Amino acid sequence: MVYEIVRYTDGLMGIEFRGDVPVEVRETLKKAGWTWDWYRGAWTDLDCHEDWAVRALIEVAMDNVKPRHKMTKEEEKALKEEYLALVLADEKNPEHWRKYYEEKIGTLVRLTDGSIVEIEKPKIETSFCYGESGYDMEDAMRSCTRAMNSEDHFRWANLKELREKIDVLARSGKRLGTMCSVIVTPTNVEGISAFHIGSLWDHRGNKKYEEVSEEDRERLLEGYRRVYAAFEKRINAYLKRYGLTKVRAWTYWRDA
């Protein structure tokens, strides 16, 4: 694993990783007092550690990294049936709604408390709107032209939301001025949970909200990567069949 130990001018030191950081390493750092800093895109602590001690901490954590369990087809099917049984339990006509719920599923994730999180199957967007406040109208028009003529832009625009969630779950890169906690909360269906990306401060009065554990963060991350890979294949198949013939893009002017 590639990383760099950095000392900042404000009395903090950081560990800047390149690429994925295994859950065992993240848990070890948290237990040792290190915290994730979105501003710097690094794990930080007071500048009170020797470099050799930091490297030793990471090496010990790496020795404890275990292979991740990958669900078999049978396990995926059983989890899907369990989820559908939960969401359809209160429906008056469950067979009528079964197909609707099935088609929404991108993948399902079992959290450590036993509850299930559904990651919905994303839809391919073909309409893009760019609105600016007068002085940026030329940029909006350029974006509009790019959306109508660039397959790379089409892929980027459709995958953007998934990519951002993966970055937050993986603690990848910097997010200036943003508090990005991954928060889990129960839904109105017992046994099913939902998660949000935001700030714990926004939900400080709601005791049902809590930040996910490193293990649950890893499970959600794996789930989103599965959905991302499947969606990328769908987008490529769509472009092969239709190209950009169905894409519509426009701009609008609004007062500054």
Image (cartoon, rainbow, N blue to C red):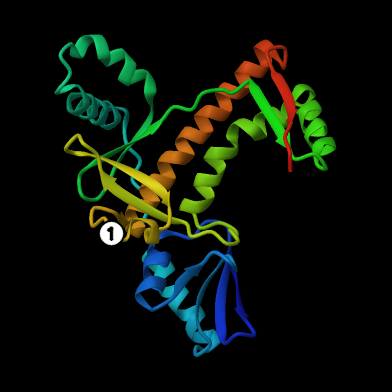
Give 23 or 106, whichever is nearer the viewer. 106
Give 48 or 72, whichever is nearer the viewer. 48
Q: Residue lying furthest front in this view?
A: 255
As helix, strand or loop, the secondary structure at mark 1 comes to loop
The residue at the point 51 percent across, 79 percent down is 55
Compared to 215, does 70 lie above or below? above
Q: Name the image quarter holding residue 188.
A: top left
Side of 32 relative to 88 (left or right): right
Compared to 50, does 201 lie above or below? above
Q: Which residue is mark 1?
A: 205
Task: Give the quadrant of the N terminus.
Answer: bottom right
| Neighbourhood count class around disc 1 (C-alpha, 10 Å): few under 14, some 14–19, many 20 upward | few
x, y percent for residue 125: 59, 23
Side of 244 relative to 76 (left or right): right
Q: Name the image quarter holding residue 237.
A: top right
The residue at the point 28 percent across, 59 percent down is 205
Q: Can residue 67 be seen at all in this image of the molecule?
A: no
Give 71 or 127, whichever is nearer the viewer. 127
The residue at the point 66 percent across, 30 percent down is 155
Q: Can residue 87 be seen at all in this image of the molecule?
A: yes
Q: Count up the numbered dots.
A: 1
Give 256 or 163, whichever is nearer the viewer. 256
Indicate the amino acid at tag 1: Gly
Compared to 203, does 84 lie above or below? above
x, y percent for residue 166: 50, 46
Task: Give the quadrant of the C terminus.
Answer: top right
x, y percent for residue 25: 42, 66
